[in-house]
Amino acid sequence: MNQKGLSSILIVLVIITVIAIGGLYSLLESRRIDYVTKPSPAPIEILQPTPQPSLSPITNTSDDNTQICSNPSTGVRLKLSEALDIAQKSDCTTIGSLTQSSLCDEFSGTWWINIDTKEKKSGCNPACGINPNTKKAAVNWRCTGAIPSNP
């Protein structure tokens, strides 16, 4: 084969290669556009952690400086003065004396009044819980369950 014949074959091969690369590029580009134009699935909802009940001080009402604790699910309200009255007449005072420290559980509306016990229990911090719905009080020892090790 002569030089002119080889040049012609080489030119034809280059043209075929350019066409093939162009076709391949066109195919890839059309697939990329398909991915972009197709509707994406619904976004995944990220769930937030459920808030844990917390004990928080209750603010005073504006009219007479009365502290009120409310149960959000029942709407029942209980004044701190009423809760103290209930606690004084309950078994809470048989294990010790009520302190000035009181908190309202904002999720249940329960008043918690700390108790200074006559006899201490290791790992426990007792409080008197006053249920706003039943108007009853009960001792909750609030023990950690940890057993101190002997040295």
Image (cartoon, rainbow, N blue to C red):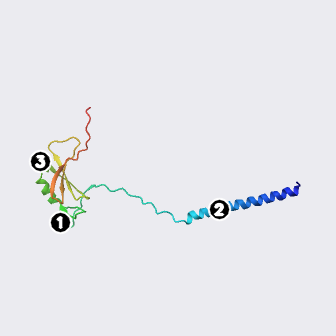
Query: Which residue is identified by label 3?
Result: 94
Quarter-of-image position of residue 110? bottom left
Residue 80 vs 123, above or below: the answer is: below
**Toward the viewer: 132 or 45?**
45
Q: Earlier in the sequence, mark 1 or mark 2?
A: 2
Please name whichever residue, 114 or 33, is drawn nearer the observer in this view of the structure: 33
Picture coordinates of residue 49, whole percent (x, y): 36, 56
Q: Residue furthest front?
A: 1
Please tell me the numbered disc located at residue 27: 2
What amino acid is at disc 3? Thr
Q: Residue 131: which numbered mark, if any?
A: none
Residue at (73% x, 60% y) in the render: 18
Q: Quadrant of residue 122?
A: top left
Task: Please tell me which residue is depicted at 75% across the width and 60% down the height of the picture.
Answer: 16
Where residue 64 is drawn, which disc sits there? 1
Residue at (70, 62) in percent of width and height: 22
For label 1, the crowd category at 10 Å Cα-Cα, with few meaning under 14, some 14 to 19 and many 20 or more, is few
The crowding category of the residue bearing disc 3, from other C-alpha atoms within 10 Å (few below 14, some 14 to 19, many at least 20), is few
Task: State the quadrant of the C terminus.
Answer: top left
Amino acid type, residue under disc 1 in the picture: Asp
Residue 123: x and y in percent read 23, 42
The N terminus lies in quadrant: bottom right
Question: What's the amino acid at mark 2?
Answer: Leu
SS at mark 2?
helix
Q: Secondary structure at mark 3?
A: helix
Q: CA distance from mark 1 to mark 2?
A: 78 Å
Q: Position of residue 56 (x, y in %)?
A: 26, 56
Looking at the image, the residue that sits furthest to the bottom is 63
Residue 121, picture quadrant: top left
Mark 1 or mark 3, which has the lower sequence index?
A: 1
Which residue reaches farthest left?
89
CA distance for labels 3 and 2: 85 Å
